[in-house]
Amino acid sequence: MKIRVIASAVLFLAAAVVFKIAFATPTPVTPAAPQVDINWEKMDHDAREEYMRNVIMPKMRKVFHDFDSVKYAKINCKTCHGAGATNETFKMPNPKLPKLPSKPEGWTELNNKHPEIMKFMMQTVKPEMAKMLNVPQKDEKNPKGFGCTNCHTM
């Protein structure tokens, strides 16, 4: 009798585990951010191009599309680098991107007129690009870090 009770308990527990595994809602797994161990400044042209194509472009295509899928329906090298991206004559910062203000009151006006894009650029684009380039974000402590003027002119 005792063996039957133990066997029944084991079978019950095994069935419960199988049921839980079979019918449980899977917990979404967020992949860890890739560890970036690059030195953009020391990369040669080919290495930079490969990194842009394989790391930066897929990530930023998704980031921009998630922000505004209509405006950023088609993201490619020209989006940031301009027409010169096709023949590698582009310059960064790109004067064809929206020009940034040079005075504090211009920044205030820009933030008031376009708060969504400004928030997106400051809180998403800037930190993501800095992370992928393995450089600090530009701020008072890191004036040479990645910031708005890496892409936009003033």
Image (cartoon, rainbow, N blue to C red):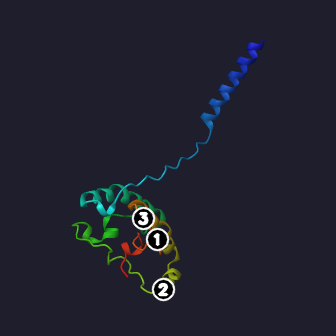
Q: In which quarter of the image is residue 99?
A: bottom left
SS of the residue at dot 2? helix
Residue occupying image coordinates x 42% and y 74%: 143
Query: Residues under labels 2 and 3: Cα distance?
Result: 23 Å
Does residue 153 appear to the left or right of 33 in the view shown?
left
Check whether the beta carbons of the residues at disc 2 and disc 1 lie within 8 A of each other: no
Which residue is tagged 1? 121
Question: Looking at the image, is 132 positioned above or below residue 142?
Answer: above
Identified at 32% across, 77% down, the residue is 96
Amino acid at circle 2: Pro
Judge left or right: residue 39 versus residue 64: left
Q: Name the residue under label 2.
A: 104
x, y percentage for residue 121? 46, 71
Tag count: 3
The disc placed on residue 130 is 3
In this view, the residue in front, 45 or 8, is 45
The image shows residue 13 at horizontal and vertical percentages of 69, 26
Q: Is there CB contact under 8 Å for labels 2 and 3?
A: no
Q: Nearer the viewer, mark 2 or mark 1?
A: 2
SS at circle 1: helix
In this view, the residue farthest toward the top is 1
Q: Position of residue 11 (x, y in %)?
A: 68, 22
Task: Point out the image quarter for the C terminus.
Answer: bottom left
